[in-house]
Image (cartoon, helix red, strand yellow):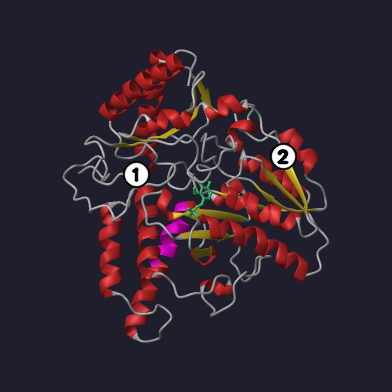
Amino acid sequence: MPGLSPVSDPALERPEPPAGAKSAGQAPTRRIYLDYAASTPCDPAVADLMRRIAVHEFANPSSSHTAGQRAAQYVETAREQVAAAINALPEEIVFTSGATESNNLAILGVAAAAEKRGDSRRRIVTLGIEHPSVLGPCRHLSKRGYHLAIAPVHSDGTVDLAALEATIGDDTLLLSIQTANNEIGTIQPLAAAARLAHDHGALVHSDATQALGKIPFDVEILGLDFASFSAHKCYGPKGVGGLWVCGGPTRAPIVPLLFGGGHEHSLRPGTSNTPAITGFGEAVRLASERLPEDARRIATLRNDFETLIQDRIKHTTLNGALDNRLPGFSSLTFKDIDADALVARLPDLHISAASACHSGTPEPSPVLRAIGRSKEQAHASLRIAVGRSTTRAELHYASRRIAEAVCRLQELGA
Ligand code: PMP
């Protein structure tokens, strides 16, 4: 099978960078992409399919003529593919523009439904290490009279179940707890957390964006009510994702945030993006098929990389639940360096000092702070995420480059 990454496969044609793109034309020849947590390349088979759909199946899937019905069939096939990957029913999948929208819809839509039916529950429970698209709507609700409770996590990033139990009460409307963290990769004890919430009659939503296609995710085993997904984290296109709604949107305690046509079981109006949805379905199907082999190979590469780094750079700390992490994820804290300065010294490596959603802010990573790292340690941390196309040779090169740069910064006292 040819390499999938346009980044590491010179045989794949790379388009010219757009005019004005930062440092266009000056990039070093060797570039290694190790930021698969921020986004993954679209699988070429998925991209080919999407192109064919965009060109040939452009009819509106809501149109009743045969071209429209054919387009609708592609959307329904994708719904079946996503449902099959998580052991759900197709009618329980709602397509959205991505996990940001799915998270907002789940949290705000559940609250709006509760208000509509006169439910007096006004407590929302979540974790401080959630993605901003979970924390944002939760904070929004807290300004509208909801009580927002942040359950603590242990130093490996897993939720403290005893503290969670004490946080959830009969006034809890919703527990929103991620499946796996986007920075340190820690996987949460979801089934146990969901049971605690259900014991109090609360609903449970999980942001499963980083988990889909990387670890087994079975909604029946986990016992959730809602789960959010995004295609671009599992080798599908950007700008499309889904919300799984237990029992389907017409029966579940959730109402739409937008008003328009009756698309997506009237929970999410707007003309279906047939190419993107088709690509999402196919990407999820491929990821499920490849999951056992990919997970094993990628975890081995990540572990070997961490060994190389720890051998080369003394006093390196690994963050997260080391035996219970997403396969490709590695969060590393070095001693006495500034990670932004480190990243700036390594233009040949596409790596992040923090998650892409957090970069650009001067604040230290809230995830690393929540697991007990000091501000200085959080500023001295890198996130590496290995993916399908990563090779052992790339990781050898990357570990050497990172080690050289860390040592240089330590010498400079920067
Ligand atoms: N949740 C998590 C855990 C994520 O990592 C991301 C993407 N960084 C999102 C939600 C948002 O996903 P999207 O880009 O599809 O809006």
Relative to the observer, which residue lies in front, 91 or 400? Answer: 400
- Residue pushed farthest bottom? 65
**261 sits to left or right of 239:** right
Query: Which secondary structure, mark 2?
Result: strand
- Residue pushed farthest left? 11
**130 sits to left or right of 184:** right
Tell me where residue 4 sits by quadrant: top left
The range drawn in magenta is 77-85
The residue at 36%/36% (across/down) is 34
**Image coords of residue 282 (percent x, y):** 35, 57
**Image coords of residue 348 (percent x, y):** 30, 34
- In the rendered view, would you say 166 is above or below 337? below
**Image coords of residue 405 (percent x, y):** 37, 22
Relative to the observer, which residue lies in front, 362 or 150? Answer: 362
Query: Can residue 61 be found in the magenta stretch?
Result: no
Chain-order first, disc 1 or disc 2:
2
Give the number of the disc on residue 151: 2
Amino acid carrying mark 1 in the image = Arg
C-alpha gap between disc 1 and disc 2: 35 Å
**Image coords of residue 278 (percent x, y):** 36, 64
The residue at 54%/64% (across/down) is 92
Amino acid carrying mark 2 in the image = Ala
Q: Which residue is mark 1?
A: 290
**Residue 256 in sight from this viewpoint:** yes
The residue at 52%/19% (across/down) is 336
Image quadrant where one finds the N terminus: top left
